[in-house]
Image (spheres, rainbow, N blue to C red):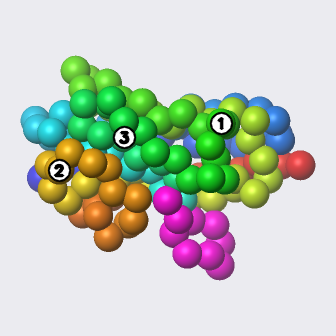
Amino acid sequence: QVQLVESGGGLVQAGGSLRLSCAVSQRTFSSFSMGWFRQAPGKEREFVAAITSGGRYTYYADSVKGRFTISRDNAENFVYLQMDSLKPEDTALYYCARASLPIVDAPRQSSGYSMWGQGTQVTVSS
């Protein structure tokens, strides 16, 4: 059974940085695009970033472009989200997700992902 386990969340002041990690227990991890999503209280889950299976292409929500960086290590089965210049509006529960199919492009909608982690909380104080 595929498992995704996020870590690295916490409390940080505005302008600070955090690095989220997602460990994926799957032999064929390198065949799937991966994504990060977030959900703030009272809001819908939203797309943050995605990366294709080989790591060549990355995609970002406009709200995080230039501040967040998604990457992956296919040898170790990890996907990362480096978050810099954090803002209070970045406060949310962050989820990593695995695409439903081993497709070339990385989905930017949650419907394109079938496996999800339990989430890690990020809180940015002003």
Residue hosting label 2: 103
- Please tell me whether mark 3 sits on a helix, a strand or a loop: strand
- Please tell me whether mark 1 sits on a helix, a strand or a loop: loop
Q: Is residue 68 magenta?
A: no
Is 121 situated above or below 18?
below
Q: Contact (CB < 8 A) between labels 3 and 2?
A: no
Query: Would you say residue 19 is visible in this rendering?
Result: yes
Residue at image point 67% right, 37% down: 67
Residue 17 picture location, percent across and down: 70, 32
Residue type of the residue flagged with mark 3: Ile
Left or right of 8 in this view: 64:
right
Residue type of the residue flagged with mark 2: Ile
Residue hosting label 1: 66
Q: Main secondary structure of the magenta part?
A: loop
Disc assigned to residue 51: 3
Left or right of 66 in this view: 13:
right
Residue type of the residue flagged with mark 1: Gly
Is 23 situated above or below 113?
above
Identify the magenta region: 39-47
User: Farthest residue toward the top?
Assistant: 75
Pointer 2 or 1: first along the chain: 1
Pointer 3 or 2: first along the chain: 3
Q: Contact (CB < 8 A) between labels 3 and 1?
A: no
Left or right of 100 in this view: 20:
right
Find residue 16 and report its image quarter: top right
Is 50 situated above or below 56?
below
Residue 123 picture location, percent across and down: 71, 51
Q: Residues within 10 Å of mark 1 (few under 14, many from 20)?
A: few
Pointer 3 or 1: first along the chain: 3
Q: Residues within 10 Å of mark 3 (few under 14, many from 20)?
A: many
